[in-house]
């Protein structure tokens, strides 16, 4: 499906004078089932040393119930390339997409506004937390089975994601950065608060605040407009980014970038492979196209990225949408419409 997004991304880049050379790598469920190989070392080294960016289609296939290939490829690339920033914007691109009613009384959102304005970015730590799969097991398969899963939080890694969020907020003139953890129940999370406090002094223009993850989930549903930047651990970032996507039209519109400044980034829609949609031609290509916008911006093509996003907004405005957004268009019809919009306005 991600292939449907490529003409639009290529077109926006070409309008900005850049010809993207796409290279297609076969790794995924089919390749794994045929060869037993997930991501071979030479492919990994190629991605590390010889490309500008990686555009990754959703992984996950009912024929691989243990999801080993997805773990190896997606989490493997995040860890091995040390892509420590998982940047996940949550933006309401059209008022009709908002899952929420009018803002509750007494909140900062302007009650005179007919729609809601949601525009926040989640900075998800992407290299440790509970995702390293460390731990141990005893008495497996018995009534006394015990599974121990370790969450790892180390100062240098917490430090760098906090800085990434604070620096991004400064650069993009965002006022507030919210730290999210669960230190009231998980003492290890106090490290996040200590470092946020210490590093925060280097960013006097940014308002810093803290929320426990449960309270933040509630507030995001009540009043998402008050948040600018949220910085959090791997697991909470995973959960909150789906919650965020649900506020602004669902996973069909949610892009993400896995970054390590100065290295090639890995760009993927937040959504999975949606096997129930496979072959129907109705999956929404917009998340992949918006992910392409993040990719272009990361490669220095900010203007092209902005045009791609405007093209998606125009398609939404024109009702050119797939069934998940209430439309009746196919994946390719939506993607073609977006390319035509770029042609018309280029
Ligand atoms: C995501 C996905 C992955 C994650 C899964 C597929 C391991 O949900 O990118 O949000 O949890 O990071
Ligand atoms: Mn997820």
Image: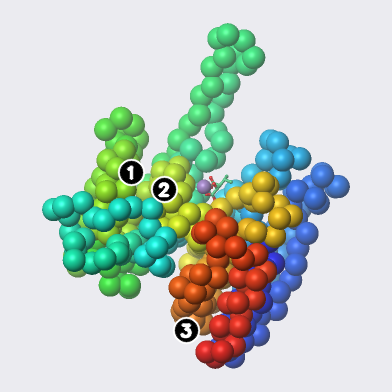
Label 2 – label 1 distance at C-alpha? 8 Å
300 and 116: which is toward the camera: 116
From the image, tell me which residue sits under label 2: 243
Residue found at the very far left of the displayed protein: 106
From the image, tell me which residue sits under label 3: 303
Mark 2 or 3, nearer chain start: 2
**Helix, strand or loop for disc 2:** helix
Answer above or below: position of 195 versus 167: above
Q: Residue at the spot x=43%, y=51% of the render?
A: 246
Quarter of the image with the C terminus in it = bottom right
From the image, tell me which residue sits under label 1: 217
* Dot 2 alpha-carbon crowd within 10 angstroms: few under 14, some 14 to 19, many 20 or more: some
Res. 72 in view: no
Answer above or below: position of 10 versus 169: below
Q: Disc 2 vs disc 3: which is toward the camera?
A: 2
* Dot 1 alpha-carbon crowd within 10 angstroms: few under 14, some 14 to 19, many 20 or more: some
13 and 329: which is toward the camera: 329
């Amino acid at each position: 499906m991600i292939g449907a997004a490529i003409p639009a991304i290529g077109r926006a880049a070409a309008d900005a004078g850049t010809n993207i050379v796409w290279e297609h790598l076969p790794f995924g469920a089919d390749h794994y089932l045929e060869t037993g190989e997930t991501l071979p070392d030479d492919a990994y080294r190629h991605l590390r040393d010889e490309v500008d960016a990686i555009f990754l289609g959703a992984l996950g296939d009912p024929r691989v119930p243990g999801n080993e290939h997805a773990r190896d490829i997606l989490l493997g690339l995040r860890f091995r390339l040390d892509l420590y920033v998982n940047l996940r914007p949550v933006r309401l691109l059209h008022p009709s997409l908002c899952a929420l009613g009018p803002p509750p009384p007494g909140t900062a959102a302007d009650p005179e506004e007919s729609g809601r304005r949601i525009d926040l970015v989640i900075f998800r730590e992407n290299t440790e937390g509970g995702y390293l799969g460390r731990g141990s097991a005893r008495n497996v398969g018995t009534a006394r089975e015990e599974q121990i899963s370790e969450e790892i939080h180390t100062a240098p890694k917490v430090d760098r994601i906090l800085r990434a969020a604070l620096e991004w907020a400064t650069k993009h003139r965002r006022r507030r950065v919210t730290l999210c953890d669960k230190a009231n129940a998980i003492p290890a999370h106090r490290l996040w608060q200590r470092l946020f406090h210490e590093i925060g002094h280097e960013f006097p223009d940014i308002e810093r605040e803290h929320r426990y993850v449960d309270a933040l989930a509630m507030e995001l549903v009540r009043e998402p407009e008050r948040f600018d930047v949220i910085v959090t651990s791997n697991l909470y970032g995973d959960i909150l980014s789906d919650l965020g996507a649900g506020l602004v039209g669902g996973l069909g519109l949610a892009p993400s970038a896995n970054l390590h400044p100065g290295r090639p980034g890995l760009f993927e829609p937040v959504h999975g492979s949606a096997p129930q949609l496979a072959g129907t031609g109705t999956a929404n290509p917009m998340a992949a196209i918006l992910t392409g916008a993040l990719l272009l911006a990361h490669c220095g093509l900010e203007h092209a990225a902005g045009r791609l996003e405007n093209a998606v907004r125009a398609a939404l405005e024109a009702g050119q949408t797939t069934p998940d957004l209430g439309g009746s268009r196919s994946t390719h019809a939506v993607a073609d419409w977006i390319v035509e919009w770029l042609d018309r306005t280029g």
